[in-house]
Image: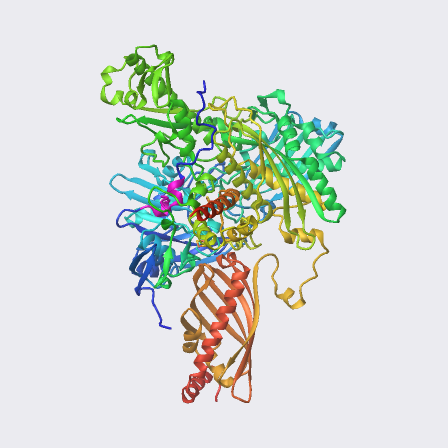
Amino acid sequence: MPRLSASDRCSVRFLLNGRSVAAEAEPRMLLTDFLRHSLGLTGTHVGCEHGVCGACTVQIDGKPARACLTLAVQVDGANVRTVEDLAPEPGRLSVLQEAFRRHHALQCGFCTAGILMSLDAYLKTNPEPSEPALREYLSGHLCRCTGYVPIIAAALDAAKRLREATAHA
Amino acid sequence: MSVQAQAWTGRSIERVEDAALLTGRGRYIDDLGVATGTLHAAILRSPHAHAKIKAVRTEAAAALPGVTAVITGADVVGLTTSLPVGVRAPIKCWPIAVDSARYVGEPVAVVVARDRYRAEDALDLIEVDYQLLPAVVDPHDALDAGAQRLYESLSSNVASDRRFRYGDPQAAFAEAAHRIGIDVHYPRNSCTPLETYGIIASYDPGEDAYDILSGFQGPFSIHSVIARALKVPGNRLRLRTPPDSGGSFGIKQGVFPYLVLMGVAARVAGRPVKWIEDRLEHLTGSVSATNRVTRLEAAVDRDGRVRALAWDQIEDVGAHIRAPEPATLYRMHGNLTGAYDIRHMSVRNRVVVTNKTPTGLNRGFGGPQVYYALERLMQRIALELKLDPIDVIRRNLVPANAFPYRTASGALLDSGNYQQALEAALRDGDLAGLQARRDAARREGRLYGIGFAAVVEPSVSNMGYITTALTPEERAKAGPKNGAQATATISLDPLGTVSAHIASVPQGQGHRTVLAQVIADELGLKPSDIVVVAEMDTARDGWSIASGNYSSRFAAAVCGAAQLAAARLKSKLARIAAAQLNVGAEEIEFADGKVRARRNPDNAAPFGRLAATSHWAPATQPSDVDQAIRETAFWTPPELTAPTEADEINSSLCHGFIFDMCGLEIDRVTGAVRIDKYVTMHDCGRVLHPGMVAGQITGGFAHALGAALYEEYAYAPDGSFLAGTFADYLVPTSMEVPAPLILHIETPSPFTPLGAKGVGEGNCMSTPVCLANAVADALGIADIGLPLTPAKLAAATQNAEPPPPARTAAAMPAGKRRALHGAGEARVAAPPKAVWNALLDTRILASIIPGCHDVEQVSATHFRADVTLGVGPVKGRYRAEVKLEDLVSPRSATLIGSAVGALGSAVGKGSVRLAGDAAGTTIISYDYDAEIGGKAAAVGGRLLDGAARIVIRQFFEALARRVAGISKPAWRLWLERLLAQLGRRP
Ligand code: FES
Ligand code: FES
């Protein structure tokens, strides 16, 4: 393994929300800091920096991942998706985002990006989730404002609408 | 004040805040751009709960490339004055340790550097000499005459001791049939918003002025505190807040000492400075709710009627009395009798300092501590007198026809019908059904309990209640403090559209949406027509000391002020319209975006055109209208007066009512609590936005559930903090929070413009004790303390656990101090002698100890090393000392070591045994016992154990690689040198 020092620069090339990005990062830079401060995508939040709260969740190659436990250099060659990519176009919200707004599933919104990224991935493979399954799945996210009840309601509602949309399509 | 036709207010419209927050376009403090040249700060914190600081050596840190400044206590003392303290006591309160560190996590130095990574590198290079002092952790111990004092200037650890008497409690106790009491140790916890503290500070030497942007949530009385500390006039301290906040729940009031600290950092560095707190810092050193020891007694008639209460409260505010403390203790002073009609009361309030994090605002603020005692007591009364707990509550509630009701200690309960709320909750929450479930469960031998709690939820704090901590004489000297100025500004621009500016500093509660509803109703517009600007700027906005987001004042006070401002603007616009439409001003109405004559709606003007008049054609205004462009309304309720000579205080303007009831089951084997059903009945006056009210209740309930069942800011007896990560401080997840059944009745407050009362904090007051009452009912025990963890409850449901095996027990230090034990084996492909020699070679050690920078040999058997180790999120540099004893070459040795770093300390002992086999391989077996203190202790056992195992494994793997790779002649050389050093001949 090569020995890296803090002052080294590594080039990182990856797909970010569908666009290719080439940038440099120190070997020790966290993906959260890289996304937020080097690349300016501040929608991904940092709540704990130790992998418990889930606020930093992004999708790496389609799977939810903790950006605070990932080094920037690790996403070299990967496909990364963040909350900024969820809405179909500026001024419109996705079905899941709409459901969150309708159900008041956010207050301060600090946990929301991570929860949306997890749910977006989950509902793709689990179009008909039960409430207990959703509760268990979301237990990797902390929200201090809502008490989770409206988040679960929004997720169930979004799943239903997404199913209906697929049925009509 | 007349309330207009309510088209929008009262409806759960979608929030204007949400589109940005859902798409990653929120603007939280760490998302905002900063001025070019802005530097980043990191804070070195004390690993010790109590220590004198003998020296802080910062040269190496300052010399690190990229570091601009290192600030210590001495710099802060030179540029500021002590933060004022809320009681009359000769103590100082600095935002950084000066001479002494008094809690784990107290700032000791600040590094300002090019980026945060560099700043943290530099922290590792600061050396601090501490002289340890005994730590005072328990508030009871703090009272001891012989206890270690925190402040030499204070004769004891008691910073305030006040006694109060209302009515004739002595006579009531003498006459009463029963005297029933309860003791409570309420623990520490915090609502821990998901976003931590953040600050961007700058200083302009030309104007001697500070400009500080932060998530500070108010109250802005603290502006005066900060300005005084920074030694500038009020108009040279500009406090601003970012557009969005990642939650606060009171906690972001506690950022204010850091505003002073970062102000100084920016001044010393000569550049703007940004600081974002990390989670470990937040949990360890930001702020906590108070822990409190309470003895509460009641004088009770045979039928359960309570005649008098006697409170004895010992409030633990931690290491400093930070403004506005001891407010937690006095916030509930007016309503210490809760929802009950009790005319006689005595109170003794003591405030003690201990070696723990200073306390401050936290959702519920004082309510959880008070109601835990009061409502546990009500249950005890029912049990001891063999009465139905509901009957005891019923018998004591304030009568419905008594409002507004003046309590014994001076609160004016504005409105309510507690009986109606209680009966509706029992009916709609189906108490009979719950009881049937309890009976059925108990028949099957399961542990099922039902709990109740009746609570008065105060909101809109009187800025004067804090002075109840002072004696009437001290108050007279200081001058009266009272009121709760709320403010809002509404402006019309030249296109006739409406903007509002508020000083309520929302922290996720959707203030902008609700205000748009209120203003839209007043002006006959749609909420989407109104833009509400909620970020605050003390240099530009209307504000006062009560401004901010606390004591659930938004709906009751801020919305009222906004309505008042809108009404004023409207009355001016009506006069302008009257002139234009040729009708009397009283004939004008505002509806559907138009201003029109009531009896002839066709005689109308679009709102926008009329609203632009003052900009474009002021000469056409009637002479009695000065301008219709901008109105700022201030509103303070006359009911909020200063404490009286007799210490009566109307501590809050509004008093909502909550009745909670729950059924829960305790697992006999695990001790885990499963909530079967939770019912919460609220009367919060008029509901302005049902969806948000439900959100406040559910969110508060989740906080309360965490406080009741899981969360504790736990400390070891030596003051080490034990809950430094979200893996140690367990907040509830979606698996733990059930949906409560929320019920409402509405008795509008007669004292607020819209009839609304606060609703955000009530469940933090009612739910912990409701759950505890249910647990007490399930287990049939009287003495239960929070948090109701499975371990605690399992102890009550099962026989005591068998003692741990003898060896571990001996190694395990007393109390909750973190201890590490481990043992293992490693194989090295070299004979024992080679391994032995490598272990005693400083150069080899330096290359194989994980994270080692340097090994220095003090004597033949004494080594000193500098190492950087990471444990979970806690990475830090340690200075380790290792002494070897019982050397039996090449077979065994005992290692006695200690490590001290900014992150904590460890002392331990280990033994290493080497055994060779015929194949020339050495089997190394080792074991160790260590005690951990300081920051490292805060990250928790599971991380520490894992980290220790990994580090030791890495060490032996490196050893194996290294020794196996050494050619014989080379280690013969080392061997000779080594033995020479040991004073022996080969
Ligand atoms: S910030 Fe990554 S899990 Fe909390
Ligand atoms: S909405 Fe604030 S933490 Fe979830």
Q: Position of residue B234 (x, y in %)?
A: 34, 34
Decide if residue B782 is in sight here.
Answer: no
Residue B27, magenta (yes or no):
yes
Q: Position of residue A64 (x, y in %)?
A: 44, 56
Q: Nearer the viewer, residue B310 or B375?
A: B375
Q: Eyeballing the image, is B441 above or below B864?
A: above
Q: Position of residue B948 (x, y in %)?
A: 51, 67
Q: How many numbered discs sit on the rendered protein?
A: 0
Q: Nearer the viewer, residue B685 or B354?
A: B685
- Color scheme of the displayed model: rainbow
Q: Nearer the viewer, residue A114 or B775?
A: A114
The quarter in which the N terminus of chain B is drawn is: top left
**Relative side of B926 to A100, left or right:** right
**Relative side of B779 to B238, left or right:** right
Q: Quadrant of residue B400?
A: top right
x 72%, y 54%: residue: B798
Decide if residue B789 is in sight here.
Answer: yes
Q: Eyeballing the image, is B511 above or below B674?
A: above
**Relative side of B675 to B210, left or right:** right
Q: Eyeballing the image, is B570 above or below B766?
A: above
Residue farthest front in this picture: A168
Q: Quadrant of ligand 1?
A: bottom left
Residue B717, magenta (yes or no):
no
- Part of the protein shown in magenta: B18-32
